[in-house]
Amino acid sequence: MSFSKSEALLFFILTLFIGSCQSDKVEYPNKNLTLESFGELRDSAYMLSYSQITGVAERFSRKYSDSTLVDRNNRKYYRENNPIVWSDRFGMAHQADTAMKYIRKGYEHGISPKTLYLSNINDCYKRLKRLNFDKKHPISKVLGEFDYYMSKSFLRYTCGMQYGFIDPCDILNHFSEDDDTCQPKVLFDLDIAKNSNEYIDSIRALAKHNKIGSLLAEVQPTDSIYKQMQAMYIDITRHRPDTVKLDSADVVRLLLNMERLRWKPTLKRGSKYVEVNIPSYTVRGVDYERHYIEEMKVVVGRKNHNTPILSSMIKWVEINPQWTVPKKILRKETLVGYAKDKNYLAKHDLRVYEKVMKPNSDRYQLKPVDIASLKNPNEILKEKYSVRESRGKRSSIGRMIFRFENNFSVFLHGTPEDYMFRRENRGASHGCVRLERPIDLMLFLFNKEKRNDSLLIDKIRVATDLKPRTKQGYEKYLKNKKNNEITYFSRLFDPSIPLFIRYFTVYPDRKDSLCFYKDNYKYDMVLWSYLSDYSDVQKWLKAKSKPARVQYLTGDALRKKREEKAERERKEQERLEKEEAKKAKAEETLKKKKTDNNNSSDKNSPKDSKNKKK
C-alpha cells in the first residue's frame, strides 16, 4: 500500500491533534452545579404570580367609571377576581394575536385607537413578545394590565360592530319634547337587536377558549352599502385626503350612516320589502325574486311633525278611504280655523259625528252632528265625537291608504296635491308618508295572483277615476257607474310585506351611487355629539372643537324644561292680562272723556242760546 504526499501529510496532522487532546484534556466546568448555583440568575421581574396578575387587573378596573353596558360588565368581571382571559401558563395566549389583528384595523370603521385603548395594549403586547420586563414593568403587572385593557378593547370592538357603538333609542327619544305633555317625543321606534350581559359573557367565554376567529369574522358588516361607505371613508381619510372634494360634514355623515347600518332591525327584509328613506324623500320597493325595484318620490313630515323611524308589516290597502282627523290636529288646526271662519269645516269637507248606541243593540253607530249645535266647539275633542273627511279625489289621504301597525297613527297614502312632488324640499305632512304613485306601489305589493287579476286591477282603476284596461273591466265597472259614485273596498296583501322607515343622510340612488342628503330633522347633529367620543376622524377634521353634547331630557333636565315652559306660559298670561287691563282702561278713559264732553256741551248750551239772542 502506498500513500500520496497529501494523504501522508493529513495523517500526520491528525496524529498530532489526537495526541494533543489526550495530553491537554479539560473537564466540563458545570458538572457539579446545584440549585443554589442559579440563585444569582433569579429575577423577580420575570417571575409569574397568578394572584398578582388578577390583583393588577382588579386595580385597573377601579380606575374607570364608564357608564356603558360593555364597560360596566367588564369592570364587574375583574372586580370579582374572575379568571384572566388573555394569558395562560406560557404567558400571552394565542387568541390575543387574533383579536389584535382586528382591533388594529378599527380605524377602517372610523373607530378611534383611543376608544380601543390601542396605546396601552400595544405597549404591553410588545413587552410580552420581546420578554422585555424590569422592576417597573414585571411580567405579572404587564399581564394583568394587558388582560384588563385587552378585554375592554375586545368587548367594545365586538359589541360595537355587532350592535352599534351608540344606542339610538336612548338618544333620539330623549332630546325633543312634546309641546302638550312636556314629555320626551318618541322619534325612533325601529325594533333593533340590542346588546346584553348574556351576549358579553358568551363572547368572553369564547375568548377564554381560543374560539374568537369565527366570531370576529361574523361581526364584520356585510351590507354592500356599508362597504361602499367604508371604502369612500378610507379613501378620503387615509389614502388621498387632499384630492377628494368632500367637506368635513360629509366625512362625518359617512361615519354616522355606517353606524346606522350597524343597527340591525329584528324584522328581516326577506325576498320582498319596502323602505322609505326620509332625507332623500323616496320610497323603494325591492323584490329579489323578480329582480325588480319600484321607486318613487314621497312627502314626509314637516318640522315638529317628524315622520317616525320604525319597522312594521304592510297588511292591507284601502281604496277610497275616509280620514278621521286626529285629536291633536283638531285642537291645533281645525278648532283654530273654525274660530276664524264658521264655514271652515264645510270648506274642508269635514263632518262631526257622535258615537251613539244603536236601538235595541249593544253596538255603536255614528250620528252626524252640527258643530254649531254644541254648547262649546271644544266638545268635539271628547272621546264620543269624531271629525271625518269625505271620501274621494279631494280627500287629504288620496284614493289609497296602506295600513300597518304602529304607535303613531301614521300610514302610507296618496294625496290630491300632486304639485308637492315637484318640490325639492318635500317635508310637508303631519308625519304620514304621501306617495307619488300609490297604485304602482299597490301592484308591487300584490302577489302574483292578484297582480295578474285584470278584473281586480280594473275595479281599482275605475274606483280611482282611471280608465279600465280591459273590455270586461269596462262592462263590469265603468259602463253602469253613476256620476260621483265613490266605491270603498280593501284588499289584503298575502303575505304581508316588511316595511322600514329609515333615516340615512348618505343613501344610494337607483344606480347604487352614494348620494348625500340634508339633515332636515337634525338627527346627525344629535348622534354625532355622542358618536364623536368613539370616532377616529376628529383629528382629521379641520374643526378642532368637539361638538357640544345634546343632553338627555330626563330627570332634572326634563323637570327644568317643564318649569321653564310653565314660567313662559305664566309670563305670557300676565302679558295678556296687562294688555287686556290696559285696553279696558283706555276704553274707560275714552268713555269718560266722551261723557265729560257731553256734559260740557249740555252746560254750554244755555249760554250759546243767550249769546244767540243777544
Image: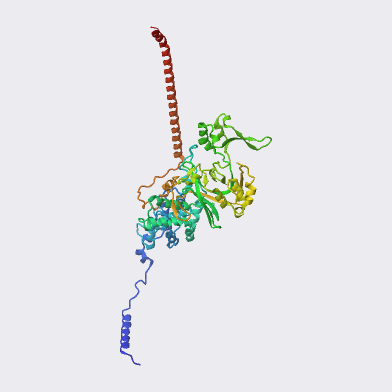
Q: How many marks?
A: 0
Query: Residue at horizontal 42%, vertical 24%?
Result: 582
The x and y percentages for residue 149 are 41, 55
Residue 359 position (above or below residue 402):
above
Q: Is residue 471 left or right of residue 534?
A: right
Give the camera-side residue of 152 and 435: 435
The x and y percentages for residue 396 are 54, 41
Which quadrant holds the C terminus?
A: top left
Query: Residue at horizontal 63%, vertical 47%?
Result: 477
Give the camera-side residue of 550 and 10: 550
Q: Is residue 392 left or right of residue 558?
A: right
Work out whether residue 566 can be spotted: yes
The x and y percentages for residue 542 are 35, 50
Outermost residue, right side: 360
Q: Is residue 94 left or right of residue 4?
A: right
Query: Residue at horizontal 56%, vertical 42%?
Result: 393
The x and y percentages for residue 137 are 36, 57
Work out whether residue 210 can be spotted: no
Outermost residue, top side: 614
Which quadrant holds the N terminus?
A: bottom left
Residue 605 position (above or below residue 360):
above
